Image (spheres, rainbow, N blue to C red):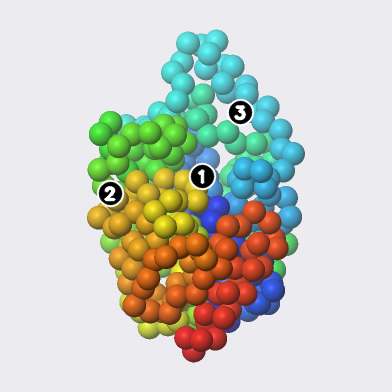
Amino acid sequence: MVTFLSGGTGTPKLLDGAGVAFSPEDTTIVANTGDDIELGGLFVSPDVDTLLFQGGGVLDRETWWGIDGDTHRTNAALMDLASAADLPEGPQYLPEDQQTAGRDLANWRRFSGIAEFMTIGDRDRAVHITRTSLIDQGYTLSEATERLASAFGLSVDLLPMSDDPVASLVHTDEGMMHFQEYWVGHRGEPTVETVEFRGSSNAEPAPGVLEALSDTVVIGPSNPVTSIGPMLALPGVADALAQTTVVAVSPFLGDEVFSGPAGDLMEAVNAEPSTAGLATAYPFADAFVIDEADDTTFDRLTLRTDVTIDSPEDAKRVVRTIEDAIETVN
């Protein structure tokens, strides 16, 4: 039995090769929900959706988000309407009093749908409408995710990290921003001062998460701060990881990050922005898988391979190294 902690695109890319070592019925994926937002009244769960679309065989693998071949007529119409009505474009974070009103699950992550700043496809939008409607009918996020996973024919167990709201908020030199506003709306350009996982201290791991963490855990090459950090901030998660076997794959090649803003975010939380910083980010890890050209050393098992993942065959190579690490530690 193995559990993957997944966020962003790094771990989904790794999961393309998971079957070479782990059967689907023995695999659980816990997905980050700190990136979730409510946009124009619809609840969007980007890291969950990437896994739904990947498992359903419809993921756009050029972008690693959205549905392959999707149309964007509604998004284009929203942009045209905003322009014609002389309405502002870009991320429009709703006022503080509206962040905590109404649907609890959207707490501190609510945006206007005017000139929709995230490009959401039409078929993709159907998922958000269904999820939001299920939640409004009284389903938890876990229950809604289970229904959606069934619809997409997933063969693994997919769990959101929590049914409670946790918002990844990035404090920058231009003010506080939700992570999606910082990364999508501002392209990661503002200087990061610190990162906050608002709501995490009052949130609980979703049903089944702590049980899944009693199995061997793999942390893929996701952003340690905003993809994995929200999970670690949940009560009981770090303790559970300290009690089980954990193998972490580096998202860095030395001090170069493969993709995304992991370097800037690591530095903002006082962790070295490099492979070496994983010792701070994941003190509970029993083994690290790092690139063969990376000369970083750790005080625990370290296996090396080419960790660049551009294809399922690349993913299989990294997964085989993870399997070797698990067998050595155990």
> Where is residue 281 shown, x and y percent of the image?
34, 64
Task: Give the x, y percent position of residue 276.
Answer: 35, 63
Work out whether mark 1 precedes mark 3 in sequence or the reverse, and give the earlier one.
1
Q: Nearer the viewer, residue 312 or 129?
A: 312
Front in this rendered view, residue 293 or 142: 293
Residue 102 appearing in the image: no
Quadrant (top left, top right, bottom left, bottom right) of the N terminus = bottom right
Residue 176 versus residue 78 in the image, above or below: below
Q: List x then y, in percent, for residue 100.
A: 33, 43
Distance from disc 3 to disc 2, alpha carbons, whole Å, reads: 34 Å
- Whether residue 314 appears in this view of the structure is yes
The vertical placement of 1 against 16, above or below, is below
Q: Which mark is residue 60?
A: none
Task: Determine whether label 1 and label 3 are within 8 Å by CB.
Answer: no
In this orientation, which residue lies closer to the viewer: 196 or 317? 317
Name the residue at 49% across, 25% down: 114
For the residue marked with disc 1, what is the amino acid?
Phe
Upstream in the sequence, badge 3 or badge 2?
Answer: 3
Nearer to the camera, 118 or 105: 118
Q: Secondary structure at mark 2?
A: helix
To which residue does mark 1 refer?
A: 43
Q: Could you tell whether 73 is left or right of 217 in the image?
A: right
Residue at image coords 72%, 50%: 58
* 218 to 252, vertically: above or below: below
Residue on which the image places disc 2: 268
Q: Secondary structure at mark 1?
A: strand
Q: Is residue 92 left or right of residue 158?
A: left
Q: Dot 3, how many residues are within 10 Å of its Cα: few (below 14), some (14-19), or many (20+)?
A: many
Mark 1, other Cα within 10 Å: few <14 / some 14–19 / many ≥20: many
Task: Say which element carries label 3.
Answer: helix
